[in-house]
Image: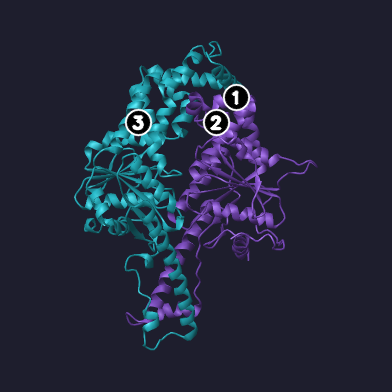
Chain colours: A cyan, B purple
Amino acid sequence: MKGPAAIASALEGKLVVVCGPGGVGKTTVSAALALAAANLGRKTLVCTIDPSKRLRTSLGLARLTGAPQKVKGRLFAMRLDPKQTFDDLVRRHAADPEARERVLSNRFYQEISRHLAGTHEVMAMEALMGVSGDFDLIVLDTPPASSALAFLDAPKRVLDFVDGRVLRYFLKPYFVAGHLAIEPRTIVGRTFLRIVDSAVGLQFLRDLSEFFLAFEGLFDSFRETANSMGALLKAEGTTFLLVTTPASSRVSEGAAFAGALRERGLRASAIVANRVHPWAMEGGIDLSVLEKDGRASRLDAEVALELRALCAREESRAEGDARQLRQVASKSGLVAVLVPELESDVHDLRSLGAVASWLAPSGTAS
Amino acid sequence: MARRSADPPVRRDLPVDLDGTLFVLGKGGVGKSVIAEGLAALAAEAGHKTLLVRIGESARETHPEALAPGPTKHGFDAVDLDARTAMDEFVRHVVRLRPLFERIIRSEVYVKFFAAAPGLPELVLLGRIREYALEVDRSGEPRWRTLIVDCPSSGHGLLMLETPFAAHRAAPVGPFARMAERIMTWLKTGARIALVAIPEEMAVVEAVEFKEDLLERTGISPALVFLNRMRQEKLSAAARHAVAEIDAPPGSSDRLLLDCAAQVQRRTRLEAFHQRRLTTGLGLKPLVLAELSDCRPAAIAAALAGDAA
């Protein structure tokens, strides 16, 4: 499948998950994809975490809220707030108002809901599943992460942490009493508790204990969310896109990502290479005229020399990009769709449309 | 790539102050590691005993031995750290008995809970870096005069720097809190933060937001900011004049040259725009670096010195 065809088919599905390291223009690419799909007549929602002000401006929105907002035509946007979603989950599932308050005000919960690896991703999916019925397509801009793989492993990481078996083994007998009243049965367990106790002190453990006691009723719904996230990612109609740039020298990351998706039985559709030198684009430039042109130059000899040198530097930059892109494609086995480096920032729907036209040439006639 | 060891040592004045500990942070893909390595090489070249701490994010097989810093061919020492390994080392230090240690770090409770508890391994990791910074040799001199820490990409980097402050809030008393407090004090007085950005929308926005978040959560402000990958192509006045005035026929070599120059000009203006936004947003003058093709100390030194000139 050619690049644009891979994107077109992704936009015909239900969910496009846009992955990639930070700083590659993932959010812009997500918004542009959603715009392209909306222009094709699909009711589309782009979900993003904490977009920059300029992206909000580019979508023509003063602010993005936690509920889908209409941008234009069939394009909608929503901001994901993992902490808020987590709080809502607690509110919905807590056994009674007292238990709810205990969890929400617990210091350990506050740390976990903000910091626990994987929480953001799972909460993003939770928020997304709540609104998925209302849209033909959702484009999900994944939270910034060190690696594109973090998103895929999020459900497992979170489940590992709240895994009931581990808690029963370790936490409950210990924490019911709130102090070291009950000795774990094994020497490993005992030594372990001694380390925890000497390292973190009792107050921390009390907070921890309270958190787990109060949170107990929530584990099942939490696990459900994490499990349905796993199922949704595997579902027919879900595709993954990896955004990268030739400059970020992350060739091996593209390959690792493609491999990891295959391993997990997930569908990777394409790599989007953003900010490619315009001359490295397909049919980018023909420099042979510099040698062949017989016409007399109107340029001053010195200026001509200067510009030829400049041109040569640009050519070698373009070649560097092209080399990187060939490696990405060959190592990942995925087609790369190229978006050229733009000469201005994406700051309105029109410039977003310019990005969209490179991603999905058929979906941009508005 | 490496400076040949036969080269005579070159002593040059450092374009930036590299004494003490410098945490290098930035979004993924902005060239943070290259700059960290370049700074370490630069400090080493200036005669500083230098340690480069590279922080990985992946959990891996336990090799506490890997925590020992060793020399590199670039003239500085280096050590690879990740939170999990630092955590394992910490446990080994507490437990002492090797068989027991082995069983603990393989136990499910440890792997799934303790080593995954938010913040704890990061805190231990920071503690380890602090120990490197304070380490003295037999004569009582600091073992390293310069410590460059190549941090995880900014979100994770911020979380790491924030852990002692968060831990102190979560557990204000006890040995854990005392450890957090020592690290907090050291971060505030003995360490500095350098940000790396590139002239692109999100990278600049994130650098500015990072500064605000860092200040809010830790009370620390970045001391340095590097603006990397600035191509800074400058056209001569005559060339600029030609771009503006000469109307070359399509398909001619003149047209191609002038179009190329115009393209470069637009890009340069965009770079300048981002540079201004970064400067205003951070209240710091960025140290501008060209596109570095490698991290040889000479290359980075020249880039930095060129900016200072």
The numbered mark at residue A226 is 3
Helix, strand or loop under label 2: helix
Helix, strand or loop under label 3: helix
- Residue that numbered label 2 is attached to: B120
Q: Is residue B14 visible?
A: yes
- Residue at 48% from the left image edge and 13% from the top image edge: A173
Chain of residue at mark 3: A
Other residues around mark 2 within 10 Å, as few (<14) / some (14–19) / many (≥20): many
Other residues around mark 3 within 10 Å, as few (<14) / some (14–19) / many (≥20): many
Q: In the rendered image, which quarter is residue A348 located in?
A: bottom left
Question: Can you give x and y, in whole percent of width and height, for residue B186 in the image?
Answer: 66, 38
Task: Evaluate whether label 3 is on the same chain as label 2.
Answer: no
Q: Is residue A194 above or below residue B228?
A: above
Q: Quadrant of the C terminus of chain A?
A: bottom left
- Residue that numbered label 1 is attached to: B99
- Residue at 23% from the left image edge and 45% from the top image edge: A13
Q: Is residue A64 above or below residue A272?
A: above
Question: Can you give x and y, in whole percent of width and height, for residue A204 in the image?
Answer: 55, 22
Q: Quadrant of the N terminus of chain A?
A: bottom left
Other residues around mark 1 within 10 Å, as few (<14) / some (14–19) / many (≥20): few
Chain of residue at mark 2: B
